[in-house]
């Protein structure tokens, strides 16, 4: 007797093996057997089960692992995470781009207050231990794993000052990282275009990353960075540049991995800006040369040619120093604003640049009409120059505006997706189709990345086999990030499972209408419980907080 048996589906195990028709038995949240059916259609003696699921005509595979998520606060606001589970995601890796749920001390906490208030989150915490307790109490739909954000760590120690850290401050940062790892974080992430990460130098990042190369005696058999010697800490990075200084930024990343002896992972690898599209081959060559020399390098990417981040990333980096209030003061000052204006126009002289930037979210109701429109379009309505409209939006929204940047090339996207060490990440927070997270016009990647990858790029464009594609979104990220007993269909593994119709799976979310559900996914199971059934979300909240080496 088992709790559930999934019968006669096309099993793709996550390892990359050839698909086969088979049955999967589940009891107590784990897989108890995986059996091939014989040509006669039987898989051996009849299995007694409390629930039988007919999977004829469907792919049965491990749950998808989102390697690049930003759900720290949205999961507390709405633990349903409908936009993620409905596309087959059963595990998220959070804490990316230098921003994580913890540590939150001093200016790091002050900077997050607006985010917490936006989602009406009343609780406050300082450490991962406290934050994980809150997630457990809420109950979440999917599994949560996190990196420790370098931005959190640096801001907790020296705020948003634009300077090098002293030796004493670096030691404090190393202690905070060590504490975060001991509480369950799986590595260190950086966001080197955002304050305060933008103020750090390579030496600081190497020193911090070396913390992860020290064996953790609290986890038997664990070595944070030993080649093939157990679980490793990982350094992930939103690099200093994904455009003009792309190659130099990749070299910095590789240097950190080599000097600190840790795995490195490049977040949302891309060539941003038309003048940089030709750099894709050189970028790939740099990474592959390092891999040939034994450096453990991987990357993730979302299957779209538009990026999305804070609108104020258009500004020169010197404007960020001192935090949001100082940044606003500079923008409001006519003389300083004129300097900023000249620098932006020098960097982006092309007029169509402003057509390629769409407002995704704003904080105020008065400007909600701007969402979904380009800065050029908004400027035309208001009778203003686009660069001046940028300042008006940032001042009016007190910097709390997000944007979508149409800056990439389709052929380069396919080139990156074809690489065997590139995984899929949504680069999005978990949102739902109603409630506190259902607002604005966020990037459709948060609702359609995985169905788009499988439907458009794998099935329709034939870029890779279905078993290789499933491997890239299941077992490969599990191995890369040290996730135990997930990303694979085998006896003893956790029952994180997706059933989908390969010929029907597709994304529907668009830039104009992001809150549209994908098609073709029938069931999503997390730890043996269905969170999606017949294409609809359930009331189950079986997700767990996964920790480093545990």
Image (cartoon, helix red, strand yellow):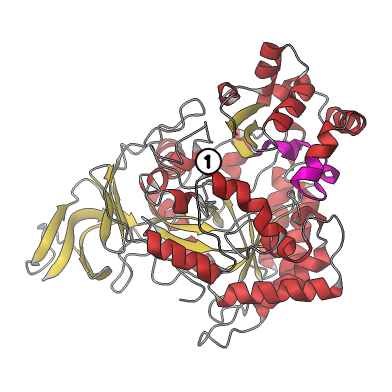
Q: Position of residue 133 (x, y in %)?
A: 45, 68
Query: Residue 201: x percent and y percent?
Result: 83, 61
Q: Is residue 447 above or below residue 391?
A: below
Asked if residue 421 lies left or right of residue 492, the reply is: right
- Residue 132: give x, y in percent of width and height: 48, 66
In this view of the protein, which residue sits in the foreground, 227 or 342?
342
Q: Position of residue 85 (x, y in %)?
A: 37, 49
Residue 4 position by quadrant:
bottom left
Which residue corresponds to the image point at 79% horizontal and 72% vertical from the top-left? 170
145 over 401 or under it: above or below: below
Front residue of 111/286: it is 111
Q: At x 57% / y 88%, what residue is drawn?
A: 217
Q: Which residue is mark 1?
A: 303
10 Å crowding of disc 1: few (<14), some (14-19), many (20+): many
Q: Which residues are magenta?
A: 310-327
Viewed as shown, does residue 223 lie left or right of 534?
right
Q: Quadrant of residue 313?
A: top right
Q: Is residue 33 magenta?
A: no
Q: Tell me the element at label 1.
A: loop
Q: Is residue 256 left or right of 27 when viewed as pictured?
A: right
Q: Give the quarter of the figure containing the C terminus.
A: bottom left
Q: Is residue 531 above or below residue 357?
A: below
Q: Is residue 475 visible?
A: no
Q: Is residue 314 visible?
A: yes
Side of 130 relative to 113 (left or right): left
Task: Return the residue nearer the eye: 325 or 197.
Answer: 325
């Amino acid at each position: 007797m088992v709790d559930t048996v999934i019968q006669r589906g096309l099993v793709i195990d996550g390892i990359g093996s050839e698909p086969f028709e088979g049955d999967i038995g589940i009891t107590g949240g784990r897989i108890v057997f995986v059996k091939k059916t014989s040509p006669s259609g039987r898989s051996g003696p009849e299995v007694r089960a409390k629930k039988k699921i007919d999977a004829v005509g469907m792919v049965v595979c491990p749950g998808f692992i989102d390697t690049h998520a930003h759900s720290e606060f949205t999961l507390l606001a709405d633990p349903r995470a409908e936009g993620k589970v409905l596309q087959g995601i059963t595990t998220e890796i959070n804490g990316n781009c230098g921003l994580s749920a913890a540590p939150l001390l001093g200016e790091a906490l002050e900077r997050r207050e607006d985010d917490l208030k936006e989602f009406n989150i009343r609780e406050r915490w300082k450490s991962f231990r406290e934050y994980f307790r809150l997630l457990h109490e809420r109950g979440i739909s999917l599994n949560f794993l996190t990196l420790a954000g370098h931005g959190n760590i640096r801001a907790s120690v020296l705020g948003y000052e634009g300077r090098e850290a002293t030796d004493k401050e670096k030691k404090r940062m190393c202690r905070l990282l060590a504490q975060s790892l001991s509480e369950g974080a799986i590595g260190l992430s950086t966001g080197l275009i955002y304050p305060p990460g933008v103020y750090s130098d390579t030496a600081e990042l190497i020193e911090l990353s070396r913390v992860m190369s020290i064996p953790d005696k609290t986890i038997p058999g664990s070595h944070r960075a030993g080649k093939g010697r157990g679980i490793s800490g990982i350094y992930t990075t939103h690099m200093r540049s994904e455009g003009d200084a792309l190659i130099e930024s990749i070299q910095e990343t590789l240097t950190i991995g080599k000097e600190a002896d840790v795995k490195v992972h490049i977040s949302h690898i891309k060539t941003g800006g038309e003048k940089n599209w030709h750099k894709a081959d050189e970028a790939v060559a740099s990474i592959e040369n390092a891999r040939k020399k034994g450096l453990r390098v991987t990357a993730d990417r979302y299957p779209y040619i538009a990026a999305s981040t804070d609108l104020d990333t258009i500004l020169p980096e010197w404007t960020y120093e001192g935090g949001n209030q100082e940044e606003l003061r500079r923008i409001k000052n006519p003389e300083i604003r004129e300097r900023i204006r000249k620098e932006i126009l020098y960097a982006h002289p092309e007029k169509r640049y402003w057509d390629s930037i769409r407002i995704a979210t704003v904080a105020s109701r008065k400007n909600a009409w701007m969402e979904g429109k380009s800065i050029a379009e908004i400027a035309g309505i208001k009778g203003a120059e686009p660069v001046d409209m940028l300042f008006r939006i940032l001042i009016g929204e007190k910097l709390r505006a997000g944007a979508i940047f149409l800056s990439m090339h389709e052929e380069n996207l396919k080139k990156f997706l074809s690489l065997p060490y590139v995984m899929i990440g949504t680069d999005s927070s978990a949102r739902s189709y109603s409630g506190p997270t259902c607002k604005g016009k966020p990037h459709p990647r948060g609702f359609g990345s995985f169905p788009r990858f499988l439907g458009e790029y794998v099935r329709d464009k034939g870029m890779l086999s279905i078993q290789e594609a499933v491997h890239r979104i299941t077992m490969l990220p599990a191995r890369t990030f040290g996730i135990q007993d997930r990303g694979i269909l085998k006896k003893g593994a956790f029952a994180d499972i997706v059933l989908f119709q390969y010929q029907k799976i597709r994304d529907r979310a668009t830039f104009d209408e992001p809150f549209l559900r994908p098609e073709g996914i029938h069931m999503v199971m997390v730890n043996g419980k269905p969170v999606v059934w017949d294409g609809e979300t359930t009331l189950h909240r079986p997700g767990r907080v996964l920790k480093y080496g545990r």
